[in-house]
């Protein structure tokens, strides 16, 4: 059963150019399975009372779907989970990082007065291992890429700890390459002022975003709309409620970690959503 | 016998029963005050923080239970008015006699209002460092790293230089890195920068500081200032020092060692001792 499912999955993934996917697998008891997603190496084993997982991060990126692992490294640190006995199915779900992402474009970006620009920021997803169905049990969220932490704000004033992400902030879909294990986040930045908006960093509250997957295997987040009304005013932040228009027909894979609340979002990121170069 | 019985019944009806009744009221009052104190604490916890909420809840408890205590005293036949007058005079006398306690009390109020720290913060006072365990009316308790509890009178905290190490979510790790004086400073700084970039716990913003701070006959002294999550301060510091040592070993960068220069004078006289 597992072999058939796995073969079909690999076939469908290779036809669309994706090497690893987000699927449900049926696992035999006592057999160790492993997968690779970017820097993450994950091992998974079904036991008599539940599951156990182990992971590590490697510098070299790799993409391999979940499959039987015959050579298990002896020095793994296994973490055990006691779950309902009848759960042989495990599902790998992409979720967004647990903190905001501070996106730093490689070059300076300037948006003309009363103008707007759409940028495509790719965010490395985390891998959530789920077992069972309604309610499913999460066996952990594992970052597929280890991003450095960073601070967005003034050291002694309001700010937020996030993950540092260097991005090319592409504006064309065709320019996006190497998006395996990454979710594309369409960010629409609107400059409502009479001055040009120059920014070096952007805070993306990814905890409020969902992950969708299109038929070609690409991952997307809902659209993030940032409205700039001047440095002394809070920036307005709104999130699309469904898949972005660039990803029509995409299915929802995971919801937001924190359901967006307009008031909360405005308070947390008030005034610091755009960081001027210094 | 009849007279004795009638006296007993008089005592019972005049004092014992009202006293028992007042005791019952006191128990009820204690229960009500505790309930209101808990509700006050729960209601104010998110708005004011644990220390202020606790102070307010204690105030509520005191104010609610006070009438019940007075009722208990009144039930025993004691004149409350006279007692309050005596308490006023006694209060003045006690106040003069316990200036330190009063000072601690007022300092405690200032600490609650000014809020230089809150429960759970890591603070350093008078050479002692620990986490704030509780802020009481007269003193503040701090739990040291080795689980000792240190009691600081509030007056001392109000007067002393106090360092709050966890006020902000981020904190800079300052390391003094010394290498042998024969090493190339530029190369050492490049290696240090690479080590910092490779460590995911080290922030890239605010930017890390790497500076050559001094040099002498044995070593080059570098300051490495790296910002990190305050909650992961010690883990990040340890991992950074480990990474620097491992990388220095890989790169063949030597740490300084103590040197003693011995010179022999030409006219020295050798003697067998």
Image (spheres, coloured by chain):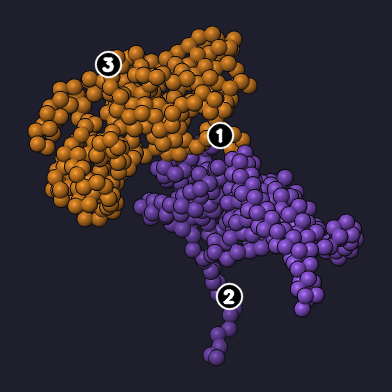
Chain colours: A orange, B purple
Check residue A249 in the rendering and tell me which mark sits there, or answer none: 3
Q: Indicate the secondary structure of the residue bearing disc 3.
A: loop
| CA–CA distance in space, label 2 to label 1 | 65 Å
In primary-sequence order, the first of circles 3 and 1 is: 1
Give the foreground label among 3 and 1.
3
Do the CB atoms of the residues marked 2 and 3 lie less than 8 Å apart? Answer: no
Q: Is residue B182 visible?
A: no
Task: Give x and y (percent) for residue A182.
Answer: 32, 28
Of residues A35 and B171, the one drawn nearer to the viewer in this rendering: A35
Q: Indicate the secondary structure of the residue bearing disc 1.
A: strand
Q: Is residue B243 visible?
A: yes
Check residue B265 in the rendering and tell me which mark sits there, or answer none: 2
Q: Indicate the secondary structure of the residue bearing disc 2.
A: loop
Q: Is residue A180 above or below residue A190?
A: below
Task: Give x and y (percent) for residue A178.
Answer: 28, 26
Host chain of mark 2: B
> From the viewer's perspective, is A20 left or right of A194?
left
Q: Which residue is the site of mark 1?
A: A159
Do the CB atoms of the residues marked 3 and 1 lie less than 8 Å apart? Answer: no
Check residue A145 in the rendering and tell me which mark sits there, or answer none: none
Q: For the residue carrying disc 1, how many other residues have a C-alpha within 10 Å: few (<14), some (14-19), or many (20+)?
A: many
Q: Is residue A127 above or below residue B160?
A: above
């Amino acid at each position: 059963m597992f072999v058939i499912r796995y073969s079909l999955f690999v076939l469908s993934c290779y036809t669309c150019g994706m090497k690893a996917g987000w699927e449900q697998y049926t696992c035999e008891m006592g057999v160790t399975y492993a997968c690779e997603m970017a820097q993450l190496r994950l091992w998974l084993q079904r036991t008599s009372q539940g599951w156990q997982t182990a992971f590590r991060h490697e510098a070299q990126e790799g993409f391999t779907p979940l499959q039987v692992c015959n050579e298990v490294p002896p020095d793994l640190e296994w973490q055990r989970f006691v779950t309902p006995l009848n759960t042989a199915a495990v599902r790998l779900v992409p979720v967004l990082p647990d903190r905001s992402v501070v996106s730093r474009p490689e070059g300076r970006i300037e948006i003309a007065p009363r103008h707007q620009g759409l940028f495509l920021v790719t965010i490395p997803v985390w891998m959530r291992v789920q077992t069972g169905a309604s309610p499913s049990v999460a066996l952990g969220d594992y970052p597929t890429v280890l991003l450095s932490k960073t601070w967005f704000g003034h050291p002694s004033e309001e700010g937020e700890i996030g993950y540092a992400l260097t991005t090319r902030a592409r504006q064309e879909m065709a320019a996006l390459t190497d998006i395996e294990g990454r979710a594309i986040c369409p960010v629409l930045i609107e400059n409502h002022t009479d001055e040009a908006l120059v920014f070096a960093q952007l805070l993306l509250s990814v905890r409020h975003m969902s992950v969708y997957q299109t038929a070609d295997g690409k991952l997307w987040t809902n659209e993030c709309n940032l409205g700039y009304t001047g440095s002394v005013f809070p920036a307005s932040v709104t999130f699309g409620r469904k898949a972005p228009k660039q990803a029509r027909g995409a299915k929802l894979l995971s919801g937001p970690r924190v359901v967006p609340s307009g008031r909360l979002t405005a308070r947390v990121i008030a005034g610091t959503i755009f960081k001027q170069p210094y | 016998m009849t007279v004795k019985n009638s006296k007993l019944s008089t005592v019972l009806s005049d004092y014992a029963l009202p006293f028992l009744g007042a005791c019952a009221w006191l128990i009820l009052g204690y229960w009500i005050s505790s309930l209101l104190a808990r509700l006050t604490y729960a209601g104010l916890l998110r708005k004011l923080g644990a220390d202020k909420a606790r102070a307010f809840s204690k105030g509520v408890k005191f104010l609610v239970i006070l009438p019940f205590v007075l009722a208990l005293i009144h039930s025993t036949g004691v004149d409350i008015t006279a007692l309050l007058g005596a308490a006023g005079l006694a209060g003045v006398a006690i106040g003069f006699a316990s200036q330190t306690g009063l000072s601690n009390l007022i300092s405690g109020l200032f600490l609650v209002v000014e809020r230089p720290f809150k429960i759970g913060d890591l603070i350093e006072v008078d050479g002692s460092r620990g986490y704030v365990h509780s802020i009481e009316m007269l003193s503040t308790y701090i739990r040291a790293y080795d689980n000792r509890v240190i009691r600081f009178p509030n007056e001392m905290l109000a007067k002393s230089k106090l360092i709050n190490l966890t006020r902000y979510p981020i904190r800079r790790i300052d390391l003094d890195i010394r290498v042998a004086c024969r090493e190339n400073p530029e190369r050492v700084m490049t290696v240090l920068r690479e080590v910092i970039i490779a460590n995911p716990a080290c922030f890239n913003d605010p930017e890390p500081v790497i500076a050559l701070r001094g040099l002498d006959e044995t070593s080059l002294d570098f300051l490495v200032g790296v910002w990190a999550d305050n909650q992961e301060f010690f883990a990040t510091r340890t991992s950074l020092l480990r990474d620097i040592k491992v990388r220095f070993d890989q790169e063949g960068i030597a740490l300084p060692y103590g040197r003693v220069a011995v010179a022999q004078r030409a006219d020295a006289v050798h003697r067998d001792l």
